[in-house]
Image: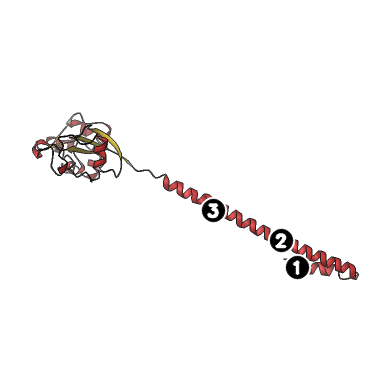
Amino acid sequence: MTDNAADKIKEAFKGLPGDRKTVIKILSVVLILLIALILRLHDENKADITIESSEPAEETEYSEESSVQPQVVFVDISGAVEKPGVYEVSEGTRLFEVIEMAGGLSEDADPDNVNQASFVEDGQKIIIPLKGSDAESGLLPGNTEYTGETSGLININTAAVDELKTLNGIGDTMAQRIIEYRSQRSFKSKEDIMSVDGIGNKTYEKIKDHITV
């Protein structure tokens, strides 16, 4: 671009006297230098704009990652703890953390039969065993999850997914629906299980003699 400007200036002033030519040559050189300086400043400004525009993108990416929140789950803990009850925890919480929320183990607890490092699950019923307890009392040594069985019956208010699936006609999906339903309201009677979407009279007739509340 600067070379073309210089050529045009030379052609325009070919017939001028020597002194004027000298002055014009000097002015041409100055003009060329000014144009070159302007172009250089323009390029530097473009580079600055490019660098500045890249920074907000990094901040946006960071904010999206930090907005991910863990899922909330509910667990029911009882037995040999100071404050039994239903607790709201984050997904990935371990049993020892729930025990701390429940005020810790009571003096008559049997910690040797509890895996406090295990993860808790949504809708899980946890019973911390007492010293000297056994399976007949409903506290199962070595198992932090209460099976929900009472005299061979499955308690639909406390049974885990695997226990519910042993019922005729209850699969993974239906067992999860039962747990979701009881997390909002407990079953007052066996017949209430028909309030769960997908469980009608036919399914109830198959399982009514095997469940309790």
Q: Secondary structure at mark 1?
A: helix
Q: Residues within 10 Å of mark 3 (few under 14, many from 20)?
A: few
Element type at marker 2? helix
Dot 3 or dot 1: first in sequence order is: 1
Residue tagged by mark 3?
A: 54
Q: Secondary structure at mark 3?
A: helix
Closer-to-camera residue (180/11): 11
**Image spot of residue 166 (x, y percent):** 15, 43
- In the figure, is residue 30 to the left or right of 59? right
Q: Nearer the viewer, residue 197 or 2?
A: 2
Q: Quadrant of residue 76?
A: top left
| Residue 26 figure quarter | bottom right
CB contact under 8 Å: marks 3 and 1:
no
Q: Which mark is residue 4?
A: 1
Measured Cα–Cα span from mark 3 to mark 1: 36 Å
**Residue 157 visible in rendering:** no
Name the kind of residue labelled 2 in the image. Leu
Whole-angstrom CA distance, mark 2 to mark 1, is 16 Å
Q: Quadrant of the N terminus?
A: bottom right
User: Spatial distance from mark 3 to mark 2, Cα to Cα?
Assistant: 27 Å
Amino acid carrying mark 1 in the image: Asn
User: Which quarter of the rendered picture does the C terminus lie within?
Assistant: top left
Q: What residue does disc 2 label?
A: 37
Residue depth check, mark 3 versus mark 2: number of the one nearer the observer = 2
Residue farthest to the top, as pictured: 188
Q: Are marks 2 and 1 in contact (CB under 8 Å)?
A: no
Q: Say above or below: 12 vs 213.
A: below
Residue furthest front in the image: 107
Residue at x-position 64% and y-position 55%: 45
